[in-house]
Image: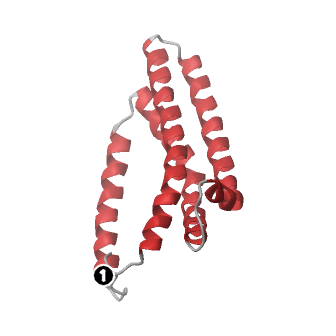
Amino acid sequence: MGHVDSKYFSAVGNALVPYYAVTAIITAICCGTTILIAQNIGAKNESQSKNYAECSFIGNSIFPLLAFLFFFFASGYMFKLMGVQSPVLEYSTSYIKILAFTLLILGVVSTSISVMQGIGITKIIMLSGLISNALNILLDWILIFGKFGFPQMI
């Protein structure tokens, strides 16, 4: 990483602040969903739990979509308001547009996990976490060190 221009590091830092703010809101909604569903399951009020799950899926589908649209089409204005100047402005805008695509599935996936936690289904969550972390380690090794014909990234 020492060979990379500091402007790129600045761009990543600028893009991550609003991106993490959006993901924090999604996470907060999911935490509330888990609590409300678990409380209503414990109180034998499954219909109310279903209502909370449905509302959370709707909210965590619409909000990330709006955030995606904002980041994709208006992030330049946001970064200008933050005081970011060229060329870091262009790098920040490009990077957040790439990050914004993750928001399209983040809300639904996070809500699915929170609903499963609320109703007590945790083995699937653990298994998917283990698989995704194992794939992350494997793909990091392949892509960083240039295995199986991929160019080395160091």
Q: Nearer the viewer, residue 26 or 120?
A: 26
Is 153 placed above or below 130 here?
below
Residue 77 at what x, y percent from top left?
A: 69, 58
The residue located at (46%, 31%) in the rendering is: 31
The residue located at (54%, 66%) in the rendering is: 95
Residue 96 at what x, y percent from top left?
A: 57, 62
Displayed quadrant of residue 55:
top right
Is 6 placed above or below 28 here?
below
The local secondary structure at tag 1 comes to: loop
Is 36 placed above or below 4 here?
above
Residue 34 at what x, y percent from top left?
A: 46, 28
Q: Nearer the viewer, residue 96 or 36?
A: 96
Q: How many marks?
A: 1
The residue located at (54%, 21%) in the rendering is: 49
Displayed quadrant of residue 126:
top left
Residue 87 at what x, y percent from top left?
A: 57, 74
Residue on which the image places disc 1: 154
Q: In the rendered image, which quarter contains the N terminus?
A: bottom left
Is 132 placed above or below 28 here?
below
The residue located at (29%, 65%) in the rendering is: 137
Q: In the rendered image, which quarter contains the C terminus?
A: bottom left
Q: Nearer the viewer, residue 67 or 61?
A: 67
Q: Is residue 75 left or right of residue 8?
A: right
**Colour scheme:** secondary structure
Residue type at tag 1: Ile
Q: Nearer the viewer, residue 104 or 12?
A: 12
In the displayed image of the protein, which residue is found farthest to the top? 43
Q: Sort mark 1 into few (<14), some (14-19) or many (20+) by Cα contacts within 10 Å.
A: few
